Image (tube, rainbow, N blue to C red):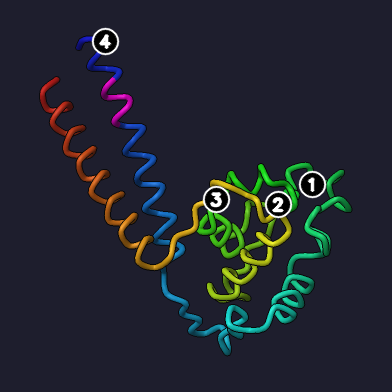
Amino acid sequence: MRIGTRIRLAMLRAASVLAAGVLASVIIVGRSDSHAGEGPPPTDMAAAPADNVTALYERRCARCHDADGTGTALRSSLRRLPDFTNARWQQQRSDPQLVVSILEGKGTQMPAFAGRLSRKEARALVRHVRGFASQEIVGVQQYGAVEFSERFRALQQEFERLRKQFHDLNGANK
């Protein structure tokens, strides 16, 4: 096998893994809010006034992230604790990534809130967290329903094109 072909195969494998990760995060964010067997579903804070979202943040998040979003109180024991006021941190994360972090947790560093918060509440918390940073943040990808669907469809098509190209190349090298 030629070196150029090996490089192309490695790039296609990496692209396939990346596309699969994007699809998985979209599926996780888009899955049903079923709470069967968990008692009554959580309240819908997304449509609630800002003071209710603030109360939710205070109740669920401020213990670690502080009321001002800086996370300074626990920074010495939790070094990877984010500072929500940091514009660079905000720019490096999309809203769906933050929703997944809230609902699925972050390993041993942050508990999962999937059983205690709905997706709508998680999205409301994301909006609240976004409010800690300057309004001049550029580059954070936020999609409306139509834009999200179009982007998702484009990513699915790209994934299928890359997968076909990978299989074509892989079959040609046997």
Position in image of residue 83 (x %, y %): 75, 49
Residue at the spot of label 3: 140
Residue at the spot of label 2: 109
Question: Which residue is rendered at x = 68% and y = 52% of the image?
Answer: 108
Q: What whole-number distance in Å separates the C-alpha atoms at marks 2 and 1?
A: 7 Å
Residue type at numbered disc 1: Leu
Residue type at numbered disc 4: Ile
Position in image of residue 123 (x %, y %): 57, 69
Residue type at numbered disc 3: Val
Classify 10 Å Cα crowding around label 2: few (below 14), some (14-19), many (20 and above): few
Residue at the spot of label 1: 78
Are the two marked residues, 2 and 1, in contact with CB atoms closer than 8 angstroms?
A: yes
Mark positioned earlier in the residue sequence (4 or 3): 4
Between marks 4 and 3 in the image, the one whose residue lies nearer the viewer? 3
Position in image of residue 68 (x %, y %): 82, 60
Task: Tell me, yes or no, if residue 174 can be seen here.
Answer: no
Would you say the magenta stretch is mainly helix, strand or loop?
helix
Mark positioned earlier in the residue sequence (3 or 1): 1
Q: What whole-number distance in Å separates the C-alpha atoms at marks 3 and 1?
A: 25 Å
Residue at the spot of label 4: 3
What mark, if any, has residue 65 been given in the picture?
none
Mark positioned earlier in the residue sequence (2 or 4): 4
Classify 10 Å Cα crowding around label 1: few (below 14), some (14-19), many (20 and above): some
Above or below residue 137? Residue 17 is above
Between marks 2 and 4 in the image, the one whose residue lies nearer the viewer? 4
Q: Secondary structure at mark 4?
A: helix
Per the rendered image, the range of residues in magenta is 8-12
Mark positioned earlier in the residue sequence (4 or 1): 4
Q: What whole-number distance in Å separates the C-alpha atoms at marks 2 and 4?
A: 42 Å
Front-lying residue, 152 or 159: 152
Mark positioned earlier in the residue sequence (2 or 1): 1
